[in-house]
Amino acid sequence: MPSQDKKLKKNLSMLDLTLIGIGAAIGSGWLFGVQYAANDAGPAAIVGWAIGAVALIFIALVYAELSSMLPAAGGVVRYPDYSHGSILGFLMSIATIIAYSTIPPIEAEAAVQYLAPKAFFNAKSGLPNFTGWLIEALLVVLFFLMNYYGIKILARINNVVTIFKVIVPLLTFITLIFSIHVSNFTSKGFAPYGFHGILTAVATSGIIFSMLGFRQAVDMSAEAKNPGRDVPRAIILELVIVAIVYILVQAVFIGAVPAHAFQHGWAKLSFQGPLVDVSLILGLTWLAWFMEVSAVVSPLGAGWVYFASTARAVLGFSNNGYFFNLFSKVDEKTGIPRAAMWLTLILGIIWTGPFPIWSKLVAFCSSASVLTYVVGPVSAMVFRRHAADAHRPVRLGGLPVIAILAFIVGSNIIYWTGWSNVQPLIILEFIALVVFFLFSLFAPRLRENLGKSFVSSIWILVYMIFMYVVSYYGSFGGKGKLAYPLDIIVVAVGSIIFYFWGIASGRRTASLETAIQEASEHTSTSTANL
């Protein structure tokens, strides 16, 4: 935890961290994800949410140990630097910042799209018109203002809003359960598009995107009152609560949809506002009204939380020495990285431009996010090997097994997002590699141990080439020459090889030494086993 992290206000309790995670997770996903998941998997979308939850639990458990051991602002971008050096850290930072910074405008677009799709969107292109864009940009400015005056204020507002955001989906479940048609689950087959369709739903329909809220606790761990105790608990509690909410809502949506709406198959199911439209068809006007309110509150609540996380990622990026020192500065009075906030605002407004609508952007965000997370299990095992003496407030039992499973599952999620998302992601990462070497000409920090950093990062470069080739030839939007399910097996076997290669490439970096020393000043000396 570099010195600038010490200026952050340590105001967040376990409840705050949990509700921040839930607030990020229950956003536009519950408004649109239930329909897109049904399009891909039919009634088996319920299974997709369960698979997504289990997959992310493996990853979240790894970060429970990492964040308790080394609480840091923008933790997701810090750990790769600690374990493998500047090149891997830079590549994962770029992916993280792009994935994070696109989410506030995605949430702003979701709110506008849900409330007035015809008034603010072009019917032919599906893109927002000028008025729609202006509203989205103003909402991003609102996220900025919500964050600008301190994390304590944000947490207080978010706690109240998040409780409402949880109540509405649960109210939806309780109400719609009385309108369920059991035949909906079987009339077209429970899994009409097979297991392949379920896996596609997990990666691209918004399932993974909607349950990534656990990372907020990781990124804000430096602002926790007791990070060693509270961050791991918040990570797991948030993920369990969110998974339950989404599974329940998906189940009642499948059951309550009128049969005529999917008479040509679940892939043809199409509502402008899925849950609102179903409620209106059933005559539940009052419930539809609550959902309309939630259609604004839920995405906006997620948007301002992700805005906060993006700023912490920028702060971590700068603290790693990859970016201008200006963005590592923290305001003494508010404990907020204000320069990072301004950059986040600029990025957010840029992303409100003429880009694809919700369903397209979330798949890319999921792919980019999970790429950054698959490095976490490798970093955790490197720390076990090269920093065995470091204090761990939470020590994960069975980490070697959980970590390799997390890496395999994460790699497959990236693959399941399909060629249309894997291709630009990998190309972007290699462009980032070129940018890194250009930056290194002017940044002495990046030239330190450059040879060691390159050797430590070869595994991830080859891994990305491997994922690129498999995706190109695979069955998820690729050429189909590598047929399902052989393609999944190939990804799994390849993941095992790269996992152990990644661990062997790790080392005890100078930044890890500093982080361990500074973390010891902020964490308790007790250890809990998970």
Image: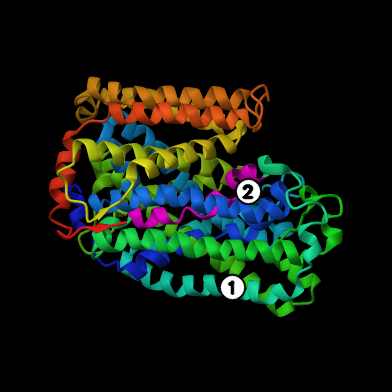
* Residue type for callout 2: Ser
Residue linked to disc 2: 205
- Measuring from the top left, give residue 523's x and y in whole percent: 18, 58
Q: Dominant secondary structure of the magenta stretch?
A: helix
- Measuring from the top left, give residue 106's x and y in whole percent: 55, 52
Locate the C terminus by quadrant: bottom left
Residue 291 lies in what quarter of the image? bottom right
Distance, label 2 to label 1, CA atoms, is 21 Å
In the image: residue 373, left or right of residue 392: right
Q: How is the image coloured?
A: rainbow
**Residue 145 visible in the shown view:** no
| Residue at (14% x, 44% y) in the render | 389
| Residue at (58% x, 27% y) in the render | 471
Residue linked to disc 1: 170
Against 381, residue 31 (above or below) is: below
Residues in magenta, as a range: 198-219
Against 282, residue 405 (above or below) is: above
In the image: residue 105, left or right of residue 372: right
Against 408, residue 352 (above or below) is: below
Q: 512 or 272: which is nearer to us?
A: 512
| Residue at (49% x, 28% y) in the render | 493
Q: Upstream in the sequence, badge 2 or badge 1? A: 1
Residue 215 forms part of the magenta stretch:
yes
Q: SS at mark 1?
A: helix
* Residue type for callout 1: Leu
Mark number for residue 319?
A: none
Q: SS at mark 2?
A: loop
